[in-house]
Image (spheres, rainbow, N blue to C red):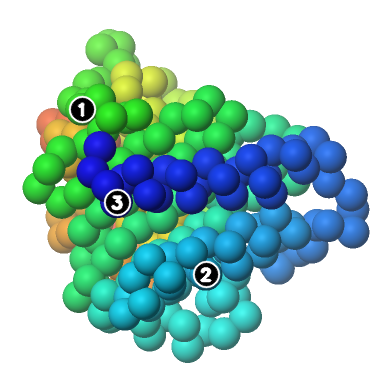
Amino acid sequence: MSALDDEIRDLLKFAAERSMLPRFRDLSESEIEMKGEDDPVTVVDREVEAFLTDALTKLAPDVAVVGEEAVHADKSVLDRLDGPCWIIDPLDGTANFAEGKHPFGIIIALADAGEAIAGWLYDPVNDRFCHTKRGEGAFVNGDKVHSTGTGEDHPVAAISRMFLAEEQRAMVDAKLAPHYRLVDIPRCAAEQYPRLALGENDVSSFKRTLPWDHAAGVLWLNEAGGKAARLDGSPYRVDEHGKAEDRKGLVGASTPKIWDEFVGRVLATGEERG
């Protein structure tokens, strides 16, 4: 691993061991709040984001920081996505963590001019560290990985029904279910992207495409030889945020072939998003 990878891994491990793991399955009700429907935030989210924001600013003073909780407090923080910036999801899978369930993790991406150029996804329970840099491949704990499908006759599709309208759920059942083995999503992007490359899932569609959830994972999966892109085939950009971009959807797959087949079926239904 590079010196930067080592530095980021040390930061993530320290944050997890200091703030996250000691509170796993030991949160009080007063340490959990709701930002919106099915959108909890915990004292851990805020504590880890504050620590990482300070550490990354010291590491690279000229690079802005965009944290999930900072954006929730001040939407103007999103303007920093246009230039050099760190993007932080301090506790990806907060709902799982708040319920005392795994998976959950920490995600950091480094972006410039709207494109992710490096990414790190850390699972503290399993000590799995996924990292990537644009043009240099994808790695797990320092070992280079190449995306592979499950090999099942019916590819495994992880699709969340949580944010789908009733007609979209009906489309999934009628048009996709006959061709795929449908499974639930892990509610954790730090887990979903590795599943797509490491032979557990073949394809997953995302309706919400927030940069702290997807910037690092999209780059990591593409560098592993899988494919993650908007439904129209355009690349995912971190400076696209809002309802218009969410309508463009996002699909990740273990291979470009599986991506093409899945998106072809989705678009054949007349849907604009997965």
Mark-to-mark CA distance, 1 and 3: 17 Å
Mark-to-mark CA distance, 3 and 2: 16 Å
Mark-to-mark CA distance, 1 and 2: 30 Å
Disc 3 element: helix
Whether residue 68 is situated above or below residue 147 in the rendered picture = below
Task: Name the kind of residue labelled 1 in the image.
Answer: Lys
Residue of label 3: 4
- For label 3, the crowd category at 10 Å Cα-Cα, with few meaning under 14, some 14 to 19 and many 20 or more, is few
Disc 2 element: helix
Residue 111 relative to residue 168: left or right: left
Residue of label 1: 144
Task: Name the kind of residue labelled 3 in the image.
Answer: Leu
Disc 1 element: strand
In this rendering, the label closer to the viewer, 1 or 2: 2
Residue contact between numbered discs 1 and 3, judged by CB atoms under 8 Å: no
Please report the residue visible at 20 percent of the width from the left and 27 percent of the height from the top: 144
Please report the residue visible at 31 percent of the width from the left and 41 percent of the height from the top: 131
Residue of label 2: 54
In this rendering, the label closer to the viewer, 1 or 3: 3
Task: Name the kind of residue labelled 2 in the image.
Answer: Asp
